[in-house]
Amino acid sequence: MSLLRNLWRFLLLLESAVIFRPKMQTMFAKYLSAVLMLLFITPAFAQVEDDDDDDFDFSEFELAAPPSKSFCNNKVLGQIPTTLVGFNYDYQFPHDLSVMPPIGGEGFFPEQTAGISPSQAFNFQGNFPIVSRNNILINLNTIFHHQSYAFSGNDSHPLMQSLGRHGLTRSAVMGTVFKPLNDRHFILAQVGAEVNGDYVFNDAGDVFGSVRMPAAVLFGWKPHDRLMYAFGLSRTYIGGSLNYVPVVYYYHTFKNQKWGIEALLPARGALRYRFNSLSVLLLGFNATGASYSLNSFDAYAQSFGIPQQGELPGFNDLLSSARNVELRRSELRLGLTFQRSIVGFFWLTLDAGYRVNWSYGVDQGGDFLRFFGDNTPYFLETELRNTPYISVGISYMSP
């Protein structure tokens, strides 16, 4: 206020100095009005600005609606891309298969060994999104696998005849659901139906009457974008026979984002190294298993046994029990996998390692529970030798 008072006195003196000069008086009046307006308006604005700064209340700004809920996604940083459609060719180097006499059939079916040179497989895998929202993901997975065997030497045994002439075919459809509960917790579930046996599609017989249904459910955590883990229970044929086993899901990318771990135990696990966004190297293991209906076995068994054994006591009863047999096949693969983008989202996969046989026995009585470590003898005990393998595949990956 003292500043304004002094300025007012100065203006009065100036006015008295020019009062007798009309032109200067007119100009003075104009400038005086402008100065006074500026002097009185500026403090007003300054006062408003100060009041806003001192009295601003953020609580007055309340959201009209609650914020939308956030959810975690189904991947970690650096994870290998998901295969949408993939084709794969697999080659197992020459090895042997030995088949022991059936239980109670010593003398009916002698022990027999034949070479397999080679064993080849063709695989198709499809992964089709059905529902894709931030609060739920539902995918439909399809698998087709056909394994063929080329026997050398004495391959007259019914099991070898069935495998050599028909091979093993697996057709499966599975639904996978990823349900995030919030930004840190999720549920992962899968249920499937598969038909496995010594069939081809133009002569499937009654193999579709033996549908197998694996399933799994897990509850998981995602602390941050580089780590996901979950625990659950699965109904599986990973050991060849029906079994119930706990499962552990663990995906972790280390801080440098070059190294990581991708595991779904006990089925698979790998140490991952990412060269860049276009190439990945995996070192680990993969365990697979299924139960295959051998519908052609009894026909080969009769043609194999009757000419040699005729009407031996109990022979017909033994064949009767052999008419409902299943091959419990399970293997463990240890190896290196290299994946590389070749054009756009098309990736090349090269895989090489060593295949270790876990189970290759023939059971009678269809599908039933057989826990790991169960030493109950198979109807037919076999010994499938271990062997190296190589495979090559082309896949169309998700963006």
Image (spheres, helix red, strand yellow):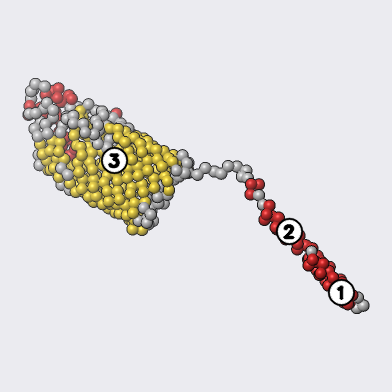
Q: Is mark 3 on a helix, strand or loop?
A: loop
Picture disc at residue 266: 3
Residue 25 falls left or right of residue 266: right
Residue 129 falls left or right of residue 349: right
**Upstream in sequence: badge 3 or badge 1:** 1
Q: How far apart are marks 2 and 1 (CA)?
A: 30 Å
Q: Are marks 2 and 3 in contact (CB under 8 Å)?
A: no
Between residue 143 and residue 379, name the one nearer to us: 379
Q: In this view, does 77 lie above or below 201?
A: below
Residue denoted by label 2: 47
Q: Between tags 2 and 1, which lies in front?
A: 1
Which residue occupies the extreme right position in the image? Answer: 20
Q: Specify the amino acid type for callout 1.
A: Leu
Residue denoted by label 1: 13
Q: Within 10 angstroms of label 3, few (less than 14), some, or many (20 or more) residues?
A: some
Q: Is residue 269 visible?
A: yes
Residue 135 falls left or right of residue 18: left
Total marks shown come to: 3
Q: Distance between the residues labelled 2 and 3?
A: 72 Å
**Upstream in sequence: badge 2 or badge 3:** 2
x, y percent for residue 393:
29, 50
Q: Is residue 322 above or below residue 11?
A: above
